[in-house]
Image (cartoon, grey):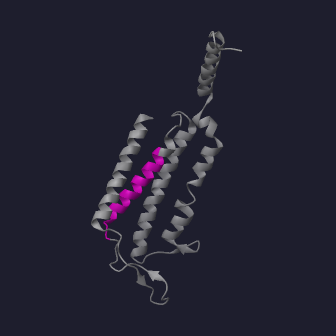
Amino acid sequence: MTRLMALLLALCAVLLGLIVIAVVTGAGRAAPLPHPEYGPMQVGIDAGELGTPSWAAYMAGIVMLGTMWVTMLIGFRSGHWIHRAVHAWMVGYLLLFVILMWSFGAYAAGDTTIVLGFTAPTSLLVYGLTLAPWIPLLLITWRFEDAYFGPDEQACFDDIVAEAKDRTRSSPEGGS
């Protein structure tokens, strides 16, 4: 648990550092261009980039996924199957993120397709990265008591309560 908390602190420090660097360098302050056919619609940005290198976007995304990964593991008993399931799920989620970043690159190069009514990057975002966290969330909610507070913890808690009751009964001012 202490290692997970230390890792979470380190990931948050890296993310905070990236945010400070982005603010200081003025990243993301580009202005959108009007769409050539539909005036009120905005398309693209004036300089063709957001003012930040793509490695910074990858790094920020991976650090955010890392914080999500670590926070989901805090409190789980390490031998429980949900602990292993979170690892497997997050590896898949990380791969989905990398595919999303790759598809944004393909889209920027003009090489994309329509998938389920959206361009490929938008479909990945809407149907993949947005919906995917609900599966482990529902799984964790369904098995919460067993994953966080199993039979061993319950037995230990029962012993503590029984010991406290015994002490209360045996004390001169306690007991009824």
Task: Tell me, yes or no, whether the highlighted magenta stretch contains residue 145.
Answer: no
Q: Is residue 6 left or right of residue 112?
A: left
Q: Note whether 92 is above or below 75 in the view shown.
A: below
Q: Note whether 68 is above or below 161 in the view shown.
A: below
Foreground pick, 27 / 119: 27
Foreground pick, 174 / 58: 174
Q: Note whether 1 is above or below 121 in the view shown.
A: above
Q: Residue 100, image x and y in percent?
A: 46, 64
- Looking at the rendering, the stretch of residues picked out in magenta corresponds to 51-70
Residue at the (41%, 44%) spot, across then down: 8
What secondary structure prevails in the magenta region?
Answer: helix
The residue lying furthest to the front in this view is 173
Q: Note whether 111 is above or below 145 in the view shown.
A: below
The residue lying furthest to the left in this view is 25
Q: Residue 51, image x and y in percent?
A: 31, 70
Residue at the (56%, 35%) spot, across then down: 80
Residue at the (45%, 86%) spot, across then down: 35
Q: Residue 67, image x and y in percent?
A: 44, 49
Q: Residue 70, image x and y in percent?
A: 46, 44
Query: Residue 175: which quarter of the image?
Result: top right
Residue at the (61%, 16%) spot, across then down: 163
Query: Residue 145: which quarter of the image?
Result: top right
